[in-house]
Image: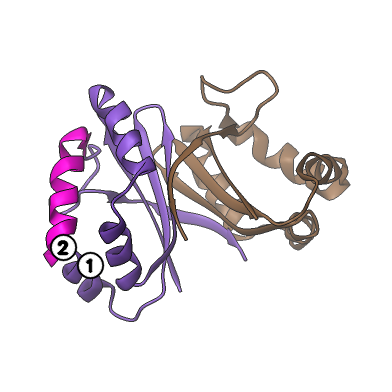
Chain colours: A purple, B brown
Amino acid sequence: MQRYASVINLKKEGAAEYQELHANAWPDVLAKISQCNIRNYSIYRYEDLLFSYFEYVGSDYEGDMARMAQDEVTQEWWSVCKPLMTPVLEAGKKEWWHEIQEIFHLD
Amino acid sequence: MQRYASVINLKKEGAAEYQELHANAWPDVLAKISQCNIRNYSIYRYEDLLFSYFEYVGSDYEGDMARMAQDEVTQEWWSVCKPLMTPVLEAGKKEWWHEIQEIFHLD
Protein backbone atom coordinates (compact mmCIF):
# COMPACT_ATOMS: atom_id res chain seq x y z
CA MET A 1 0.00 0.00 0.00
CA GLN A 2 1.26 3.46 -0.90
CA ARG A 3 0.01 6.65 0.76
CA TYR A 4 -0.47 9.82 -1.27
CA ALA A 5 -1.13 13.34 0.04
CA SER A 6 -1.64 16.43 -2.06
CA VAL A 7 -2.77 20.03 -1.87
CA ILE A 8 -4.67 22.41 -4.11
CA ASN A 9 -6.17 25.84 -3.62
CA LEU A 10 -9.91 26.24 -3.31
CA LYS A 11 -11.22 29.47 -4.81
CA LYS A 12 -13.05 31.57 -2.23
CA GLU A 13 -16.06 31.92 -4.46
CA GLY A 14 -16.08 28.17 -5.17
CA ALA A 15 -15.77 26.86 -1.61
CA ALA A 16 -19.45 26.41 -0.80
CA GLU A 17 -20.16 24.66 -4.11
CA TYR A 18 -17.10 22.41 -3.76
CA GLN A 19 -18.20 21.30 -0.28
CA GLU A 20 -21.76 20.71 -1.40
CA LEU A 21 -20.59 18.63 -4.36
CA HIS A 22 -18.30 16.53 -2.18
CA ALA A 23 -20.93 15.98 0.48
CA ASN A 24 -23.01 14.40 -2.30
CA ALA A 25 -20.42 13.00 -4.64
CA TRP A 26 -21.74 11.10 -7.66
CA PRO A 27 -21.94 7.33 -7.02
CA ASP A 28 -20.36 6.45 -10.38
CA VAL A 29 -17.39 8.68 -9.60
CA LEU A 30 -16.93 6.99 -6.23
CA ALA A 31 -17.21 3.54 -7.84
CA LYS A 32 -14.53 4.44 -10.39
CA ILE A 33 -12.20 5.67 -7.62
CA SER A 34 -12.59 2.32 -5.86
CA GLN A 35 -12.11 0.39 -9.11
CA CYS A 36 -8.85 2.29 -9.60
CA ASN A 37 -7.56 0.88 -6.30
CA ILE A 38 -7.85 3.96 -4.13
CA ARG A 39 -8.92 3.40 -0.51
CA ASN A 40 -9.42 5.46 2.65
CA TYR A 41 -9.66 8.68 0.68
CA SER A 42 -10.28 11.89 2.63
CA ILE A 43 -10.24 15.55 1.69
CA TYR A 44 -9.80 18.22 4.35
CA ARG A 45 -10.13 21.97 4.12
CA TYR A 46 -7.94 24.54 5.82
CA GLU A 47 -9.04 28.01 4.75
CA ASP A 48 -8.36 28.20 1.00
CA LEU A 49 -6.28 25.04 0.96
CA LEU A 50 -7.53 21.50 0.36
CA PHE A 51 -5.54 18.50 1.60
CA SER A 52 -6.17 15.08 0.17
CA TYR A 53 -5.03 11.79 1.63
CA PHE A 54 -5.56 8.34 0.17
CA GLU A 55 -4.07 4.89 0.04
CA TYR A 56 -3.31 3.16 -3.24
CA VAL A 57 -3.63 -0.62 -3.09
CA GLY A 58 -3.01 -1.54 -6.73
CA SER A 59 0.21 -2.28 -8.60
CA ASP A 60 0.01 0.18 -11.52
CA TYR A 61 -0.66 3.68 -10.22
CA GLU A 62 -0.01 5.49 -13.51
CA GLY A 63 -2.21 3.01 -15.34
CA ASP A 64 -5.04 3.30 -12.84
CA MET A 65 -4.89 7.10 -12.90
CA ALA A 66 -4.99 7.04 -16.71
CA ARG A 67 -7.97 4.68 -16.55
CA MET A 68 -9.75 7.06 -14.19
CA ALA A 69 -9.02 10.02 -16.46
CA GLN A 70 -10.59 8.17 -19.41
CA ASP A 71 -13.86 7.56 -17.58
CA GLU A 72 -16.66 9.71 -18.98
CA VAL A 73 -18.54 10.33 -15.74
CA THR A 74 -15.28 11.20 -13.99
CA GLN A 75 -14.51 13.68 -16.76
CA GLU A 76 -17.92 15.24 -16.29
CA TRP A 77 -17.37 15.42 -12.51
CA TRP A 78 -13.99 17.07 -13.02
CA SER A 79 -15.51 19.59 -15.43
CA VAL A 80 -17.83 20.67 -12.60
CA CYS A 81 -15.19 20.67 -9.84
CA LYS A 82 -12.12 22.04 -11.61
CA PRO A 83 -13.36 25.63 -12.07
CA LEU A 84 -13.70 25.84 -8.25
CA MET A 85 -10.00 25.14 -7.65
CA THR A 86 -6.62 26.36 -8.78
CA PRO A 87 -3.25 24.58 -8.47
CA VAL A 88 -0.86 25.87 -5.82
CA LEU A 89 2.11 27.91 -7.02
CA GLU A 90 4.49 25.00 -6.39
CA ALA A 91 2.56 22.61 -8.66
CA GLY A 92 4.48 21.18 -11.60
CA LYS A 93 3.30 21.78 -15.17
CA LYS A 94 1.56 18.42 -15.36
CA GLU A 95 0.18 18.52 -11.81
CA TRP A 96 -3.32 19.52 -10.82
CA TRP A 97 -3.25 18.45 -7.17
CA HIS A 98 0.33 18.98 -5.95
CA GLU A 99 1.86 15.98 -4.16
CA ILE A 100 3.43 16.79 -0.80
CA GLN A 101 6.18 15.09 1.16
CA GLU A 102 5.55 12.62 3.98
CA ILE A 103 7.99 13.41 6.78
CA PHE A 104 6.65 11.05 9.45
CA HIS A 105 4.68 7.84 9.60
CA LEU A 106 3.68 5.42 12.34
CA ASP A 107 1.47 2.44 11.52
CA MET B 1 -12.51 4.60 14.29
CA GLN B 2 -12.32 8.37 14.11
CA ARG B 3 -10.08 10.28 11.72
CA TYR B 4 -8.33 13.48 12.81
CA ALA B 5 -6.48 15.96 10.61
CA SER B 6 -4.70 19.09 11.78
CA VAL B 7 -2.31 21.78 10.64
CA ILE B 8 0.46 23.81 12.25
CA ASN B 9 3.12 26.13 10.91
CA LEU B 10 6.71 25.02 10.70
CA LYS B 11 9.23 27.79 11.32
CA LYS B 12 11.54 28.25 8.34
CA GLU B 13 14.61 28.03 10.56
CA GLY B 14 13.25 24.91 12.28
CA ALA B 15 12.26 22.88 9.22
CA ALA B 16 15.46 20.85 8.78
CA GLU B 17 15.64 19.96 12.47
CA TYR B 18 11.95 19.03 12.59
CA GLN B 19 12.32 16.68 9.63
CA GLU B 20 15.49 15.12 11.05
CA LEU B 21 13.78 14.55 14.40
CA HIS B 22 10.75 12.95 12.78
CA ALA B 23 12.83 10.73 10.53
CA ASN B 24 14.31 9.33 13.75
CA ALA B 25 11.50 9.74 16.25
CA TRP B 26 12.17 8.37 19.74
CA PRO B 27 10.89 4.79 20.17
CA ASP B 28 9.30 5.56 23.56
CA VAL B 29 7.35 8.43 22.05
CA LEU B 30 6.10 6.17 19.26
CA ALA B 31 5.15 3.47 21.77
CA LYS B 32 3.14 5.98 23.80
CA ILE B 33 1.30 7.18 20.70
CA SER B 34 0.32 3.58 19.95
CA GLN B 35 -0.69 2.96 23.58
CA CYS B 36 -2.94 6.01 23.33
CA ASN B 37 -4.86 4.33 20.50
CA ILE B 38 -3.54 6.33 17.58
CA ARG B 39 -2.97 4.43 14.32
CA ASN B 40 -1.91 5.16 10.76
CA TYR B 41 -0.37 8.48 11.76
CA SER B 42 1.30 10.53 9.04
CA ILE B 43 2.70 14.04 8.91
CA TYR B 44 3.15 15.80 5.58
CA ARG B 45 4.88 19.05 4.79
CA TYR B 46 3.73 21.68 2.31
CA GLU B 47 6.12 24.64 2.42
CA ASP B 48 5.78 26.10 5.94
CA LEU B 49 2.65 24.12 6.74
CA LEU B 50 2.52 20.70 8.39
CA PHE B 51 -0.52 18.50 7.86
CA SER B 52 -1.15 15.60 10.23
CA TYR B 53 -3.54 12.70 9.70
CA PHE B 54 -4.26 9.87 12.10
CA GLU B 55 -6.94 7.40 13.10
CA TYR B 56 -8.10 7.08 16.70
CA VAL B 57 -9.24 3.58 17.62
CA GLY B 58 -9.94 4.02 21.35
CA SER B 59 -13.10 5.07 23.15
CA ASP B 60 -11.82 8.01 25.27
CA TYR B 61 -9.96 10.47 23.08
CA GLU B 62 -9.71 13.25 25.67
CA GLY B 63 -8.49 10.76 28.28
CA ASP B 64 -5.92 9.23 25.96
CA MET B 65 -4.62 12.65 24.94
CA ALA B 66 -4.34 13.64 28.60
CA ARG B 67 -2.47 10.38 29.29
CA MET B 68 -0.05 11.16 26.47
CA ALA B 69 0.50 14.69 27.77
CA GLN B 70 1.42 13.29 31.20
CA ASP B 71 4.12 11.01 29.80
CA GLU B 72 7.60 12.24 30.70
CA VAL B 73 9.39 11.16 27.53
CA THR B 74 6.61 12.67 25.43
CA GLN B 75 6.97 15.94 27.35
CA GLU B 76 10.70 15.90 26.64
CA TRP B 77 10.06 15.21 22.95
CA TRP B 78 7.58 18.09 22.78
CA SER B 79 10.07 20.42 24.49
CA VAL B 80 12.47 19.69 21.60
CA CYS B 81 9.87 19.92 18.81
CA LYS B 82 7.65 22.77 19.95
CA PRO B 83 10.16 25.61 19.44
CA LEU B 84 10.34 24.60 15.76
CA MET B 85 6.63 25.21 15.18
CA THR B 86 4.01 27.87 15.71
CA PRO B 87 0.21 27.47 15.73
CA VAL B 88 -1.67 28.78 12.70
CA LEU B 89 -3.56 32.03 13.11
CA GLU B 90 -6.89 30.19 13.20
CA ALA B 91 -5.90 27.99 16.16
CA GLY B 92 -8.04 28.30 19.26
CA LYS B 93 -6.51 29.35 22.57
CA LYS B 94 -6.15 25.77 23.79
CA GLU B 95 -5.05 24.36 20.45
CA TRP B 96 -1.49 23.64 19.39
CA TRP B 97 -2.17 21.71 16.21
CA HIS B 98 -5.35 23.18 14.68
CA GLU B 99 -7.99 20.62 13.71
CA ILE B 100 -9.33 20.98 10.18
CA GLN B 101 -12.62 19.95 8.62
CA GLU B 102 -13.14 16.74 6.64
CA ILE B 103 -15.24 17.58 3.61
CA PHE B 104 -15.05 14.25 1.77
CA HIS B 105 -14.44 10.63 2.64
CA LEU B 106 -14.58 7.35 0.75
CA ASP B 107 -13.60 4.13 2.48
Q: How many numbered discs?
A: 2
- At a point 79% along the width and 53% down the height, the residue shown is B36
Check residue A53 for magenta coloring.
no
Closest to the observer: A58 or A2?
A58
In the rendered view, tell whether residue A8 sits above or below residue A53: above
Q: Residue B5 carries which label?
A: none
**Placement of A58 over or under B106, stated as above or below:** below
Count neighbours of disc 2 (C-alpha within 10 A) and say few if under 14, some if 14 to 19, many if 20 or more.
some
* Chain name for mark 1: A
Amino acid type of the residue tagged 2 in the rendering: Ala
Residue A69 marker:
2
Residue A67 position within the rendered picture, expressed as x and y whole percent measured from the top left: 18, 71
Where's residue B8, x and y in %?
Answer: 54, 34
Q: How far apart are marks 2 and 1 (CA)?
A: 6 Å
Q: Is residue B99 left or right of residue A8?
A: right
Helix, strand or loop at label 2? It is helix
Residue denoted by label 1: A65
Residue at figure coordinates x 15%, y 65% from the top left: A71
